[in-house]
Amino acid sequence: MTAIKRFIYKENVAGVIFALPFIIGFLAFLVVPMGMSLYYSFTRFNILRPPEWIGLENYTRMLTDERLRESLFATLYFVFAAVPLRLVVALAIAILLFKSTKMMGIYRAMYYLPSMLGGSVAVAILWRRLFFSTGTFNTILGVFGLNRNFNWIGDTRTAIWVLILLSAWQFGSAMLIFLASLKQIPETYYEAASIDGASSARRFFKITLPLITPTIFFNLMMQTIAGFLTFNSAFLITGGGPLNTTNFFALYMYNHTFAWGNAGYSSALAWFMLSVLALITGLLFGTRRFWVYDGGFS
Amino acid sequence: MVTRHNKIWSVVKHAIVLGFGFIMVYPLLWMLMSSFEVSDQIFHRAGLVPSQWDFTNYPTGWAGIGRWTFTRFFGNSFAYALVSTFGAVLSSSVIAYSFSRGNYPGRKILFAIMLGTLLLPGQVLMVPQYLWFHSLGWVGTYLPLVVPAFFGGAFFIFLMTNFMNAIPRELDESAKIDGCSFYGIYAKIIIPLSVPSLVTAGLFSFIWRWDDFMGPLLYVQGNPRLFPVTLALRVFADPTTVTDWGAFFAMSVLSLVPAVLIFIFFQRYLVEGISTTGLKG
């Protein structure tokens, strides 16, 4: 008994014991399911009956899958519109806010609240109803004499923009990250530049912007990954329609698994998505040295 | 001249920030006010003030769906959020302590793996994990949502490891001299000093679980008795049937109350958490 006690009290052993939850969780809830899904991706499988080996068929099927092509297009369209929009607004508001001290609490609350509540089911369904043909958005347009009872969610050109708007609306957490990084820039830099006669635009482009590029990079990466896997809004607001224009990748994967009984194919899709994300993350990291300033504040 | 120019700019700036901020919160205010409006008038109103005040939306909505009232759905949401948050905070603090103070071989590799899982979004794991839990027979229960929480969350581990790394090691050393073991240092020194990071992690965990829609959708969709508020709201507003929008907005407003309360009373922790780790809020 004392031998065991002495063993678990050894510092190295104790350290590993504390890491055990992570090791077990990593194996049980990540490695095992990923491994299983790799196997399933080579099978025909509908969850109810045992899987049947079909080799690479799921992967070759992707090449000719028209809906997958549409889904990828919709996802990329969404990411390329929503992420930059969100970041630009977040940065603009952060710059406007970061010097006002007295009203800071109220401002921060106003801008952060949508971020905090915007991901909820309540707000998604609210959004669906707001942009419906008899919805509030049209009523507001009517105040300006513009109401045409247009169904913004039912039109192939506008449906995705309803989702982009919902996503851009939630720029609050990106804004807070920008605010924190703006505050770290030493005041003396600006003073020195002012003495040298630099205009405020010049101070922004020569001091502020370069020094926050690491934060922009960080935000860009996190938001891009999250954007690629948008599910709730498409599921709840548009259901992927009209004509697959908002059939985002995560939704497409969900439908193959749960609505159409193609868990084998959707496992292959999950691995495909993982590769796409790895590629994009890698590319983003590759561009880092061209525009991200890593020199710190010294 | 310069100061006057600055003053005008300052007023303009505040006006822009306030005006734009008002547009930002307008949809939320509109929903709040609509929960007091007679249902069939809601979508004819662009402004905030209801044309006819109606307080019956709340009791009507609370009556719920079928046999179950919102008492059940809110209870489910609270139980799910509290239990998984407890698990996530406890296990993450244990793991973070191991990463911060452990000295065993392989610690750095484990930490790097943990950082890697930070970038791995849950939706990629959606299908693989579902199939795994299905084969374990856990589908139809909260086990797939709650059990993994007891094995740490990467964001929380990251947050707490950073926090613990900032606690001076001299404290550990002196405790060790006084005869404290590795376990004792965790319980008596590190945990009491890490409380702010535990609170931050706990608040985020609670909000995320409270808002979680995809998880319950995958695992408890078949059984209304187990619905959290998020699933109940979705069924309530099913587009294939007629929805009582006043009642729906009333329940929506209530579903947002916990997050708003956390925001009001713990804003400092949330802001701190987001700005130091980049946690998504």
Image (cartoon, helix red, strand yellow):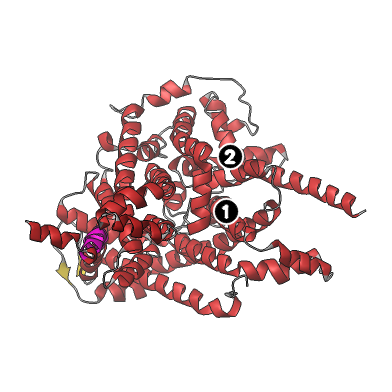
Give the x, y percent position of residue A255.
Answer: 33, 56
**Nearest the eye: B85 or A166:** B85
Q: Residue at x 55, y 59 (%)?
A: A82
Q: Which mark is residue A176?
A: 1
Q: Which mark is residue B27?
A: 2
Left or right relative to B205: residue B26: right
Q: Residue at x 34, y 45 (%)?
A: B85
Q: Are marks 2 and 1 on the same chain?
A: no
Chain for disc number 2: B
Left or right relative to B204: residue A36: left
Q: Is residue B79 above or below residue B208?
A: above
**Nearest the eye: A189 or B28:** A189
Residue A211 seen in the current view = yes
Chain for disc number 1: A
Give the x, y percent position of residue A58.
Answer: 27, 72
Residue A24 located within the stretch drawn in magenta: yes
Left or right relative to A269: residue B249: right
Q: Is residue B171 above or below residue B202?
A: below
From which residue to which does the magenta span run?
Answer: A13-29
Residue A74 seen in the current view = no
Q: Residues within 10 Å of mark 2 (few under 14, many from 20)?
A: some
Q: Amino acid at mark 1?
A: Leu
Q: Is residue A85 above or below residue A103?
A: below
Discs 2, 1 touching: Cβ within 8 Å: no
Residue B196 located within the stretch drawn in magenta: no
Q: Residue furthest right?
A: B1
Q: Secondary structure at mark 1?
A: helix
Q: Amino acid at mark 2?
A: Pro
